[in-house]
């Protein structure tokens, strides 16, 4: 088993009214490679000015992690099948909604991969197979109950 880590840092600001819920949700994500990202709650969940629309929110990060994992496996499976990828873009989307018991969750994520091939492109069946293999191999997709589709 391989351990992974991230450090999440938040500090109260002098003008926060914490007891009233009027405090900044801005914080930092620090990763082991040295990258620090500004993060916040989503303005869709916690209104401005207590969230920061410039920060990555957990919902966006969830969608990005699914998309990134899928892409990395597509690249690998394409390479193994003899296809060369020139570029890969995915404008992934997710839906936050209520579960049957009323709790909120990311209830669906749709990946919209657009691949440019360097050389021969796979036919529709081979491309569908690459995406299917990638979906089943993706560690993140295997870790969640969210419905993930590739469109």
Image (cartoon, rainbow, N blue to C red):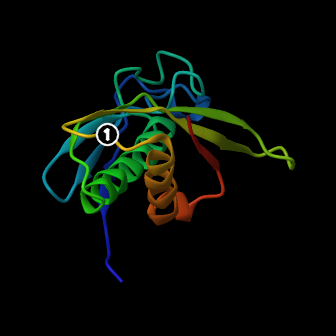
Q: Position of residue 94 (x, y in %)?
A: 57, 34
Label 1 crowd bin: few (<14), some (14–19), many (20+), radius 10 Å: some
Where does the C terminus fall, quadrant-wise? top right
68 relative to 147 in the view: left or right: left
Query: Could you say which quadrant of the image residue 44 lies in?
Result: top right
In the rendered picture of this protein, how many numbered marks are placed on residues? Answer: 1
148 relative to 25 in the view: left or right: right
Q: Position of residue 140 (x, y in %)?
A: 47, 59
Q: Position of residue 142 (x, y in %)?
A: 54, 64
Q: Nearer the viewer, residue 53 or 72?
A: 72
Query: Could you say which quadrant of the image residue 11 lies in?
Result: top left
* In the rendered image, the vertical position of residue 143 relative to residue 18, given as above or below: below
7 relative to 127 in the view: left or right: left
Where does the N terminus fall, quadrant-wise? bottom left
Q: Position of residue 87 (x, y in %)?
A: 23, 34
Q: Residue at x 13, y 52 (%)?
A: 34
For this orientation, the residue located farthest to the left is 34
Q: Nearer the viewer, residue 53 or 109?
A: 109
Secondary element at image label 1: loop
Q: Residue at x 24, y 50 (%)?
A: 30
Which residue is disc 1 drawn over?
121
For this orientation, the residue located farthest to the top is 48
Q: Residue at x 56, y 19 (%)?
A: 47
Q: Nearer the viewer, residue 149 or 27?
A: 149
* In the rendered image, the vertical position of residue 50 relative to residue 12, given as above or below: above
Query: Could you say which quadrant of the image residue 95 lies in?
Result: top right
For this orientation, the residue located farthest to the right is 100
């Amino acid at each position: 088993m391989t351990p992974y880590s991230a450090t999440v840092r938040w500090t109260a600001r002098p003008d926060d009214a914490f007891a009233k819920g009027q405090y900044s949700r801005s914080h930092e994500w620090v990763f082991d490679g040295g990258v620090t990202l500004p993060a916040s709650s989503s303005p869709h969940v916690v209104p401005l000015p207590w969230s920061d629309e410039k920060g990555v929110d957990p919902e966006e990060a969830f969608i990005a992690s699914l998309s990134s994992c899928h892409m990395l496996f597509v690249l690998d499976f394409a390479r193994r099948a003899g296809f060369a990828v020139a570029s890969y873009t995915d404008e992934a989307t997710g839906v936050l909604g209520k579960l049957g018991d009323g709790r909120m969750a990311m209830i669906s994520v749709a990946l919209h991969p657009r691949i440019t091939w360097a050389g021969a492109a796979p036919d529709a069946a081979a491309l569908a197979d690459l995406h299917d293999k990638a979906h089943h191999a993706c560690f993140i997709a295997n870790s969640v109950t969210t419905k993930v589709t590739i469109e």
